[in-house]
Amino acid sequence: MATFSEQTRTKDPKLGTYVGEFTTAGIGRLLKASGCDFAFVDMEHNGWSYETAKAVLRSLHDTGVATVLRPPSQATHHLARACDIGAQGVIPPMLSTVAQAEAGIAAIKYPPEGQRGCAFGIAHDDYAPEPVIDAMAAANAKTSFVALIETAEGVANSAAIAAHPGVDCLWIGHLDLSASLGIPGAFDSPVFLSAIDQVMAAARDNGKSVGRLVASAEEAKAFNAAGCDFLCYLGDVWLLQKALRDGFADIRATISG
């Protein structure tokens, strides 16, 4: 399995999806059988406990799906706990400044790279005993920090955020970003498109990966051509709704026809 950190080291397109509703034990095998490279696991918008998120991460990792987890906030204990339950990448919400990025990196990295509290032989290292120094180095190497750019301030600071050596990837939070810019949902607005261009340039100039949600193959192609290499295709609840909506429409049309 290529971990999320390993996937950030190539600009080849990586295809994934959002997991924020389905907690079935089979979610890992379901996604892997569908050809999924990574999953964006969310805790910000669903009320999941860390125990729930831990079970989802284990299912994904055991079947070879890489993960990035969004905790409920930027709080140090939220970020550090995300790592302890096994998240390969951590993507704190509403990241807007270099100082916030530095605090987040310190929370998820062991010394000397950060200030994460030490705990070994637990979920994040697959319960395997290892010499402390080796375990710390391995955890630091495989734990990624992803900067979620979803505010106007984050866009303004995107070049400096992308330049930070501890930032592995930028992620565009398109809906919150549009709201922050004062144009909620206006994704074709010149203001929004200019902000996206600024983030993409920051990533490109610093050799960083970029991720975002996509709703179709056409969007994925366009965003990949613009430089996005992590392409997150919709999410569990929306995919189910889409499939049912399309299926019901076909059934009704067939019956009435």
Image (spheres, helix red, strand yellow):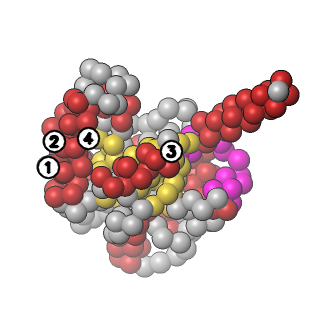
- Residue 47 is situated, as x and y percent measured from the top left of the image, at 55, 32
- Residue 174 is situated, as x and y percent measured from the top left of the image, at 36, 36
Residue placed under numbered mark 3 in the picture: 216
Q: Residue at x 81, y 31 (%)?
A: 254
Sequence-first tag of 3 and 4: 4
Q: CA distance from mark 4 to mark 1?
A: 15 Å
Residue placed under numbered mark 1 in the picture: 160
**Pointers 1 and 3 in contact (C-beta within 8 Å):** no
- Is 244 a magenta residue? no
Residue placed under numbered mark 4 in the picture: 196
Q: Residues within 10 Å of mark 4 (few under 14, many from 20)?
A: some
Of helix, strand and loop, which one carries label 1?
Answer: helix
Sequence-first tag of 4 and 1: 1
- Residue 24 shown left or right of residue 185 in the figure: right
Q: CA distance from mark 1 to mark 2?
A: 6 Å
- Residue 200 is situated, as x and y percent measured from the top left of the image, at 24, 49
- Residue 151 shown left or right of residue 185 in the figure: left
